[in-house]
Image: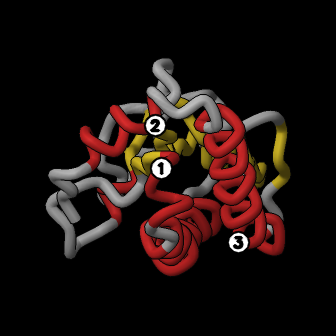
Amino acid sequence: MEDPDLSARKHLAANDPGFPARREEAWGRIVAAVDAVLRPAGYVLTKTTWSRVSAAGKSAVHLQRDRYGWDVRIVLRFVTPEGEVPDNPDWPGGEDVALAAFFQQSAGDPGTLAFVDVLEQPERLDLAVEVVREQVLPWFEALHQDHPPRT
C-alpha cells in the first residue's frame, strides 16, 4: 500500500494549525483500536506498551511515535525470563520486530501508521489491527506456551 501522496499530505498537515489536535485524535484512535484487541488477550497497557508475562517470558506490543510527529510504528518484542530473545525458529532475530514481519501481502509496512492516514484512510488502521489479532497474538501465544523456561 504505497502512497505517493503521503508526502504532499504531510506538507499540507504541517501548514494546518489544526493538525496537532488531529494528530492526537488519530493517536487516540490507534490506542483504542490496539487496546480493544490486546486487553481481552490479557495484555496490560503501561504508557505506550501493552505487555503480558508468563513463565516463558514477556511479550510486548509498543507504539513508537515518530520524533517528527508524522506517524507511529507498531513494534513487537518477546524476551525470556533471562532477558534474551527466544530460541525459536519462528523468531525473526533481533530484539524488536516490526509488524511488517507478519504481513505477507504488502510491500510496505502495515504497522507504520501516518496520523493523517488514520483519519483519512481508516482501513490502514483496520489492517494493522487485523494483523495484530490474526497473526501476532497467535504467534505470541505459541511463544508463551511452547517456549519452556530455561533451568
How many numbered discs sit on the rendered protein?
Answer: 3
Q: Which residue is mark 2?
A: 13
Quadrant in which the C terminus is drawn:
top right
Q: For the residues carrying marks 1 and 2, which lies nearer the camera in this image?
A: 2
Q: Which residue is mark 3?
A: 37
Instruction: Tell me the SS state at disc 2.
Output: helix
Instruction: Tell me the SS state at disc 1.
Output: helix
- Residue 151 seen: no
Q: Amino acid at mark 3?
A: Val
Q: Amino acid at mark 2?
A: Ala
The quadrant in which residue 2 appears is: bottom left
Task: Examine the rendered structure and indicate whether residue 22 appears above or below residue 138.
Answer: above
- Residue 134 seen: yes
What is the x, y in percent for residue 60? 64, 46
What is the x, y in percent for residue 94? 35, 33
Disc 3 to disc 2, how far (Cα)?
Answer: 29 Å
Q: Residues within 10 Å of mark 3 (few under 14, many from 20)?
A: some
What is the x, y in percent for residue 30? 64, 56
Q: Which residue: 52% across, 59% down?
A: 118
Q: For the residues carrying marks 3 and 2, which lies nearer the camera in this image?
A: 2
Q: For the residues carrying marks 1 and 3, which lies nearer the camera in this image?
A: 1
